[in-house]
Amino acid sequence: MENGKKGIVMSGIRSTGFLHLGNYFGAIRNYVRMQEEYSCYFMVADLHSLTTHPDTKELKPNVHRVLAENIACGLDPEKVALYCQSHVYETAELYLLLNMLAYKGELEKTTTFKDKVRQHPENVNAGLLTYPVLQAADILLHRASLVPVGKDQEQHLEMSRNFANRFNHRYGEVFPEPFAFNFGEALIKVPSLDGTGKMSKSENQYATIFLSDTDDLIRKKIMKAKTDAGPSAPNMPMPDYIENIFLLMKLVSAPDTIQKFEEDYNKAAIRYGDMKKQLAEDMIQFVAPIREKAESIRQDQAYLKRIMEMGAEKARISAAATMEKVREAIGLKYY
Ligand code: ATP
Ligand code: MG
């Protein structure tokens, strides 16, 4: 760890499409908050993309997009190691070694695995089954202990801790335990606009607000969010789809705006049309500057190449040091 830094941080985002509000509020916002005081490794999880997106035609633009959108959100590639997973070969070596410590039964029980099996029964590959092992390799490769992620990653982090503990127990203490991190607050889940799950790059696309959406598209998506005729009496409990709209408002609107609509709701005098119009305008205020900045970064291919090279160089130094310890601990040293 660099001198004076508070701890080692690692997290990643798959190159499977356009980044959205969930990626921002669940992950990137905390990357930016941590970049000054912590020693940070952030990567584009391009290898993880292959578990569900075997067609690689869009891979390059997607990788560029993830980098550009992270930087547009305020991530500074000079302050952190911002790199591509596939550029750091030690990832694959540690993944292989950790696979010996991961059991088929626990991998099959993972919620995300079961979801993907349901969605894509034609492509249940071993990479999908061992997705949490590759994720553990990414984190442990830098001996990170803090992992800023959204709520959907909680179970994977628990698995990373199990693999780290098993390794330490079997071969000697090498890895700190990694924990999902949100500055002591509960992990975030940004719900999809149709209330059927979370916003996502590769599912729920029409109910997800992307950081690249135009103003008009944001208006359309928000106006289509499910509402009803409103509460029939004061202080009624809120249906989950209405709660979701309030939750989105809390991410981007001013406190007095939220308070006004909460009061209207409790008085049974809320007008959902007005609320959604207000939410759409506040959302546009939030998204538009990121969209414009990302677009200009995306055009600058030479800059993106430089960023990737610089990031990989930083990540490889840390990865090489960890792998020395790992090989030594396991006994993969014969002279
Ligand atoms: P995909 O559908 O391809 O898996 P994704 O939107 O789930 O894409 P990931 O690349 O899997 O994105 O995750 C990147 C980061 O964003 C993780 O830290 C994850 O927890 C976070 N994240 C993703 N969706 C949400 C969401 N709706 N709310 C909060 N955090 C989220
Ligand atoms: Mg995901």
Image (tube, rainbow, N blue to C red):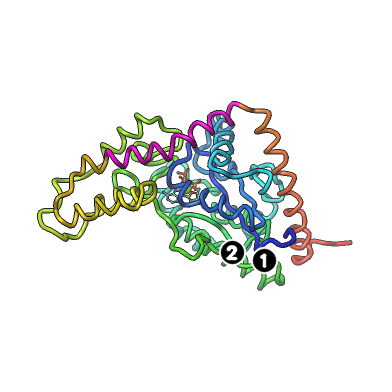
Q: Amino acid at mark 1?
A: Phe
Q: Amino acid at mark 2?
A: Pro
Indicate left or right for 36 with 129 as reference. Answer: right
Name the residue rendered at 43%, 63% in the picture.
186
Image vertical order of residue 185 relative to residue 280, above or below? below
Q: Which mark is residue 175?
A: 1
Question: Is the residue under label 1 in contact with that under label 2 (CB below 8 Å)?
Answer: yes
What residue did someone put label 2 on?
A: 178
Residue 67, given in percent of the width and then of the height, sits at: 59, 38
Indicate left or right for 64 with 254 as reference. Answer: right
Determine whether the beta carbon of the residue marked 2 sits less than 8 angstroms from the nearest atom of ligand 1.
Answer: no
The answer to which quarter of the image holds residue 279 is top left
Indicate left or right for 263 with 131 as reference. Answer: left
Name the residue rendered at 34%, 48% in the picture.
248
Name the residue rendered at 73%, 53% in the picture.
319
Indicate left or right for 43 with 255 as reference. Answer: right
**Real-space CA distance between mark 2 and mark 1, rounded to the nearest whole angstrom:** 9 Å
Residue 73, given in percent of the width and then of the height, sits at: 53, 42
Q: Main secondary structure of the magenta part?
A: helix
Pick out the residue farthest to the left: 232
Q: Quadrant of the C terminus?
A: bottom right
Residue 193, given in percent of the width and then of the height, sits at: 31, 43
Magenta residues span 277-299
Q: Quadrant of the N terminus?
A: bottom right
32 in the magenta segment: no
